[in-house]
Image (cartoon, grey):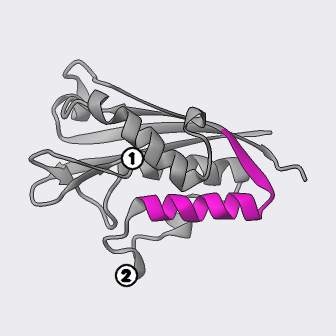
């Protein structure tokens, strides 16, 4: 068994959609990034790559590569999940935390879990999503951006 941790952060900007956990969230601002800037999916993808000791998000999907400009991050997660399975690993569990003041995430939690689980090819019970605020402290508290943490447990696949 192996554990991997992932972290990502993106700043808010006007004129972009807000995509978190593979879900379009109505909000007056989106996140800046080379791809769709899905901070939660990036953190989860990084955690999987970390657990496999297979580098990180930037090594697999560099922001200098025009092929990933505007990419849907959920597709990058699907790629990492295929790589995991092809390398003889299976996901046991994934847990994630979003850090932001607004918008509130509670009404999107279940659809995010289902979307991430589908991309990973696992049961929804293997994926946790939660959110917290910073009580107005730091960049997230000032509503300048969103951070996400993810931890995964993988094990060697049998049979």
Examine the image and state in which quarter residue 131 appears: top left
Examine the image and state in which quarter residue 136 appears: top left
- The quarter of the picture where the N terminus appears is top right
Tell me whether the residue at label 2 lies in contact with that at label 1, contact meaning CB atoms closer than 8 angstroms.
no
Helix, strand or loop under label 2: helix
Which mark's residue is nearer the viewer, 2 or 1? 1
Query: Magenta-highlighted stretch: main secondary structure?
Result: helix
Residue 114 appears left or right of 79: left
Residue 26 appears left or right of 108: left
| Front-most of residues 49 and 58 | 49
Specify the segment rendered in magenta. 74-92
| Front-most of residues 78 and 110 | 110
Q: Is residue 138 above or below residue 87?
A: above
Q: Which mark is residue 120?
A: none
Q: Residue at x 48, y 47 (%)?
A: 116
Taking the image as drawn, is residue 34 in sight? yes
The percent position of residue 68, horizontal first and vertical second, equals: 40, 74
- Point out the residue furthest to the right here: 159
The percent position of residue 120, horizontal first and vertical second, equals: 58, 52
Q: CA distance from mark 2 to mark 1?
A: 23 Å
Residue 75 appears left or right of 28: right
Residue of label 2: 66
Of labels 2 and 1, earlier in sequence is: 1
Q: Residue at x 57, y 58 (%)?
A: 56
Q: How many marks?
A: 2
The 10 Å Cα crowd at callout 2, few under 14, some 14 to 19, many 20 or more, is few
Confirm whether the magenta stretch covers residue 87. yes
Residue of label 1: 21
The percent position of residue 130, horizontal first and vertical second, equals: 41, 28
Taking the image as drawn, is residue 57 in sight? no
The percent position of residue 25, horizontal first and vertical second, equals: 22, 46
Confirm whether the magenta stretch covers residue 152. no
């Amino acid at each position: 068994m192996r554990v991997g941790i992932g972290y990502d952060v993106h700043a808010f900007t006007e004129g972009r959609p807000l995509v978190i956990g593979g879900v379009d969230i109505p909000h007056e601002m989106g996140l800046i990034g080379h791809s769709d800037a899905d901070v939660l999916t990036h953190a989860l993808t990084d955690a999987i790559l970390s657990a496999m000791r297979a580098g990180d998000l930037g090594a697999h999907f560099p922001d200098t590569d025009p092929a990933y400009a505007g990419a849907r991050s959920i597709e990058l997660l699907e790629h990492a999940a295929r790589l995991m399975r092809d390398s003889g690993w299976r996901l046991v569990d994934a847990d994630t935390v979003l850090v932001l003041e607004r918008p509130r995430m509670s009404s999107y939690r279940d659809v995010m879990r289902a979307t991430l689980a589908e991309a990973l090819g696992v049961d929804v019970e293997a994926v946790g999503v939660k959110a917290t605020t910073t009580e107005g402290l730091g960049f997230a508290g000032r509503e300048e951006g969103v951070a996400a943490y993810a931890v995964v447990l993988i094990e060697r696949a049998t049979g």
